[in-house]
Amino acid sequence: MIIITSSPNETKKIGKKIASLLKKGDVVCLTGELGSGKTTIIKGIVKYLTDCEATSPSFVLINEYPGKIPVFHFDLYRLRCKIEIETIGFEEYLDKGIVLIEWADKITEILPEGTIFINLSIINGKRKIVIKGLERRMKNDKQRKSIKST
């Protein structure tokens, strides 16, 4: 699925629509260049699921947001080696809630089966959002159209 957004607010709205399809145990990996909107889409997901305001955990690697389903937000931008992700107990978070991972391309070989991938890029000042792995959750074309409209 490909979605184009024209503003940070639209990107957050897409995040909220994605969040409505997520369930406990989901892993959502976000990739894209610096400033492409990864944290912005996560802000929408976290707001919908926990009513918290998400911030980037670039310096601490992970932020935790309590809710009916807790959200664990990893930012691997500063990850120097894969051993660091293991030392913070990454695998222990996988079944506790929803895991969101920025810069997930650094750990692709340890991601679980069924991981949802979101790639963001900037094209002519707009955000191109490519989502893979959520199609099976959308029951019909109406739901697909709903996530694409902002």
Image (spheres, rainbow, N blue to C red):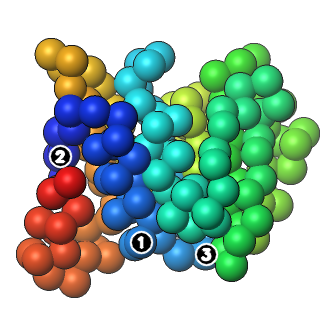
Q: Residues within 10 Å of mark 2 (few under 14, many from 20)?
A: few
Mark closer to the observer (1, 3): 1
Direction from residue 119 to residue 83 in the image, left or right: right
Q: Which residue is mark 3?
A: 24
Label whose residue precedes the other's in the sequence (3 or 2): 2
Q: For this rendering, which residue is in front, 145 or 102?
A: 145
Please give the label number shown on residue 10.
none
Q: Amino acid at mark 2?
A: Ile
Residue 65: image quadrant is bottom right
Q: Which residue is mark 2?
A: 2
Q: CA distance from mark 1 to mark 3?
A: 12 Å
In the depicted structure, whether residue 70 falls above or below residue 36: below
Dot 3: what SS? Answer: loop
Q: CA distance from mark 3 to mark 2?
A: 24 Å
Label whose residue precedes the other's in the sequence (1 or 2): 2
Q: Residue furthest bottom?
A: 139
Direction from residue 91 to residue 23 in the image, left or right: left
- At a point 90% along the width and 39% down the height, the residue shown is 87
In the depicted structure, whether residue 81 falls above or below residue 51: above
Can residue 117 be spotted in the picture?
no
The percent coordinates of residue 22 (x first, y second) are 47, 70
Mark closer to the observer (1, 2): 1
- At a point 18% along the width and 67% down the height, the residue shown is 146
Q: Amino acid at mark 3?
A: Lys
Residue 104: image quadrant is top right
Dot 2: what SS? Answer: strand
Q: Is there a contact, CB below 8 Å, between mark 3 and mark 2?
A: no
- At a point 11% along the width and 77% down the height, the residue shown is 142
The percent coordinates of residue 38 (x first, y second) are 46, 34
Q: Which residue is mark 1?
A: 20
Q: Residues within 10 Å of mark 1 (few under 14, many from 20)?
A: few
Q: CA distance from mark 1 to mark 2?
A: 18 Å
